[in-house]
Image (cartoon, rainbow, N blue to C red):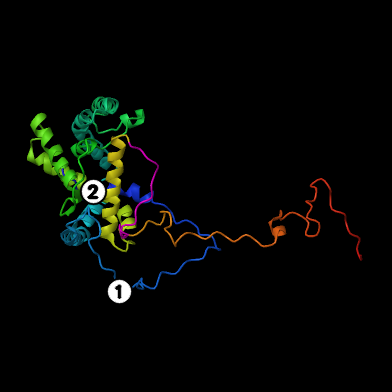
């Protein structure tokens, strides 16, 4: 199933886990840039095509600007109206039902990825919610520690080493890659051809797509504002979060779980040296010089005259007033 603008919901958790600024010691001197580096201009920064994953950046940016205008004028007001009119319990029931209808595709991709334990959990969730959960309207399986998980053919391609391809931003779809776009198309074709009803009905496909998009857009409204409104370059920020989040998901499927990494600066030039990389010749951090007087290395708790450390068991001798 093709990705909708609501796919941004997946990205918000990654943005929330970005590293917080680290404190800097007060005694660390900041080295000024070399004379060859031009001072930053007061004008708005240009947006060069500086990452290889986005060869169509100019076109993508134009689509992003147009989509942003449509979202502010149409999608966001309608989505917030949907959230205001439809009660919370009813929206949850609709969301649970939509999740239930996607489980056959998720189960198929679990099997294709050779993850039998995960596939069994997906099947258990489907059986429990279909029966006890009244056709999936009530998420009973979540209480049985079987939460809803997303999966699709794009993940299966990534599981077997297919790269993401170029980054794309498409109208009505949002951020994606060539692999995710093709994988979503396969996910949309499988249910009608293998299961049939109700996936073959046009009214079903349109209604579920519209409802899912409105519900997800309404749920992530606050997170989208927090992520993009304060960004220097919203397009680059969204691109960076999306690509890094998808890379982490593929690594997890391939069993390459690594320690949580901070999000890469979306405006950073990949050709520039990393701030965490070891310094090169001429840029090594200087160690503080050793003091000339060896007595300066003594324990600070020592007496300034004798150098002896006072015993913690000996109380200080009180002084008499007037002496």
Q: Secondary structure at mark 2?
A: helix
Residue nearest the observer in this picture, 157 or 302: 302
Name above or below for residue 39 compared with residue 132: below
Number of numbered markers: 2
Q: Which mark is residue 316?
A: none
Residue 282's spot in the image, x, y percent?
44, 62
Which contiguous range is marked in magenta?
256-271
Q: Is residue 291 left or right of residue 213?
A: right
Q: Residue at x 28, y 47 (%)?
A: 9
Magenta-colored segment: predominant secondary structure:
loop
Name above or below for residue 291 compared with residue 124: below
Q: Which quadrant would the N terminus be assigned to in this image?
A: top left
Is residue 74 visible in the rendered image? The answer is: yes
Is residue 196 visible in the rendered image? The answer is: no
Q: Residue at x 19, y 37 (%)?
A: 157
Q: Is residue 34 left or right of residue 28?
A: left
Residue 130's spot in the image, x, y percent?
23, 27
Name above or below for residue 130 compared with residue 322: above
Q: Secondary structure at mark 1?
A: loop
**Within-10-Å neighbours for mark 1: few <14, some 14–19, many 20+:** few
Identify the residue under disc 2.
6
Rendered image quadrant of residue 287: bottom right
Q: Which mark is residue 43?
A: 1
Magenta-span inclusion, residue 266: yes
Residue 166's spot in the image, x, y percent?
18, 51
Name above or below for residue 119 compared with residue 11: above
Q: Is residue 201 left or right of residue 175?
A: left
- Viewer-nearest of labels 1 and 2? 1
Q: Which quadrant would the C terminus be assigned to in this image?
A: bottom right
**Within-10-Å neighbours for mark 2: few <14, some 14–19, many 20+:** many
CA separation in Å, label 1 and label 2: 33 Å
Residue nearest the observer in this picture, 55 or 213: 55
């Amino acid at each position: 199933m093709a990705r909708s603008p609501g796919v941004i919901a997946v990205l918000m958790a990654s943005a929330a886990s970005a590293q917080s600024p680290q404190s800097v010691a007060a005694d660390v001197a900041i080295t000024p840039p070399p004379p060859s580096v031009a001072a930053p201009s007061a004008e708005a920064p240009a947006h060069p095509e500086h990452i290889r994953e986005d060869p169509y950046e100019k076109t993508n940016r134009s689509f992003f600007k147009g989509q942003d205008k449509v979202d502010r004028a149409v999608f966001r007001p309608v989505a917030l109206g949907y959230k205001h009119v439809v009660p919370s319990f009813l929206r949850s029931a609709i969301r649970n039902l939509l999740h239930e209808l996607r489980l056959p595709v998720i189960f198929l991709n679990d099997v294709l990825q050779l993850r039998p334990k995960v596939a069994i959990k997906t099947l258990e969730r489907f059986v429990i919610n279909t029966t006890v959960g009244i056709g999936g309207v009530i998420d009973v399986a979540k209480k049985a520690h079987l939460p809803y998980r997303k999966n699709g053919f794009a993940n299966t391609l990534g599981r077997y080493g297919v790269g993401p391809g170029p980054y794309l931003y498409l109208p009505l779809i949002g951020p994606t890659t060539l692999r995710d776009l093709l994988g979503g198309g396969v996910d949309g074709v499988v249910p009608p051809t293998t299961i049939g009803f109700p996936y073959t009905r046009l009214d079903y496909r349109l209604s579920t797509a519209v409802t899912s998009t409105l519900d997800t857009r309404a749920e992530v409204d606050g997170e989208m504002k927090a992520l993009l409104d304060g960004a220097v370059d919203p397009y680059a920020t969204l691109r960076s979060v999306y690509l890094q989040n998808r890379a982490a998901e593929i690594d997890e499927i391939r069993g390459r779980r690594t320690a949580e990494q901070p999000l890469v600066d979306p405006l950073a030039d990949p050709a520039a040296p990393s701030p965490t990389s070891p310094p090169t010749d001429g840029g090594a951090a200087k160690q503080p010089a050793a003091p000339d007087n060896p007595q300066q290395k003594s324990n600070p708790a020592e007496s300034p005259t004798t150098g002896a450390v006072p015993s913690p068991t000996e109380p200080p001798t009180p002084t008499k007033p007037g002496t």
